[in-house]
Image (spheres, rainbow, N blue to C red):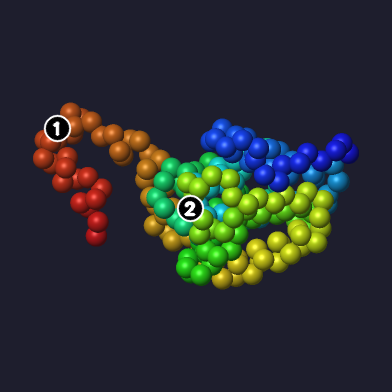
Amino acid sequence: MGPIKEINCPLDHDDTAELTYFFDVIDQFLNIPSEQNLNPSQNTLTLIARSAESCIAKALYNHKEQLKSHDIHLKVIFTQLSASQDLNNWLLPDQSPCTKPEQSIRWAKQNNLSDAHEQLTLGSVCSWSGESMRRDVNARFGFYMFDKSCKTSAIRAQRSFKALWKLSQTIPQAHFKRARFTHKPEFLNLEKGTANLSSKTSEILAPEYTRH
């Protein structure tokens, strides 16, 4: 194995550098199964993140095809479920990095659970940890630690994830329904001419006016 690249903290201070840092973390995680000949039981990657908009979550989503090719199973906990395209991408089965999003993603709804730190762990092999999930997402470069070869840190992180998973709840079905609805452009871009609808009628039929 070659020398381990030191990536505990980003060196520059702009958006591109930050995203590059997280891509580098994920790349190193994905190299570990082949480097260390892990058995299938170790091929579980767990993520704790503030939301789907967190940089670590975005970087992981960007590597979804590599996750599948490496046969790595993913379990995720978010503390915030703000309606966004990023969250939709995680919830839609045909786009999500998770094989079964409804079973593999949970919501740490309780406010006190936000004291936990963002965390990415591969079995009992390695772990990455970041700032508390209460940290402002617009703040630049908080405290990051990447323990590529420390089993003690990985095991502790794994235990933390299991404890938080038990306290978290399944994602409400309303979020899955919203993701499916907004993913269908034919429902969002109706042409008035096809149904001879007036402008006023179209406004009445808009989704926000048709709740039961």
Residue drawn where x is 54% and y is 67% of the image: 113
The 10 Å Cα crowd at callout 1, few under 14, some 14 to 19, many 20 or more, is few
Residue at 22% of width from left, 52% of height from top?
210
Marked residue nearer the N-terminal end (2 or 1): 2
**Residue at x 18% of width, y 28% of height:** 193
| Amino acid bearing label 2 | Asp
Circle 2 crowding by C-alpha within 10 Å: few under 14, some 14–19, many from 20: few
Q: Nearer the viewer, residue 20 or 125?
A: 20
Mark 1 is on which residue type?
Asn
Instruction: Report the residue marked by disc 2.
Output: 136
**Dot 1: element:** loop
Q: Nearer the viewer, residue 46 or 207?
A: 46
Q: Quadrant of residue 97?
A: top right
Q: Relative to residue 50, is residue 30 drawn left or right?
A: right
x, y (%) of residue 199?
12, 36
**Residue picked out by circle 1:** 196
Q: What residue is rendered at 57% in x and 59% in y?
A: 132
- Residue 76: give its label: none
| Residue in the foreground of this view, choosing between 194 and 154 | 154
Looking at the rendered structure, the secondary structure element under dot 2 is loop
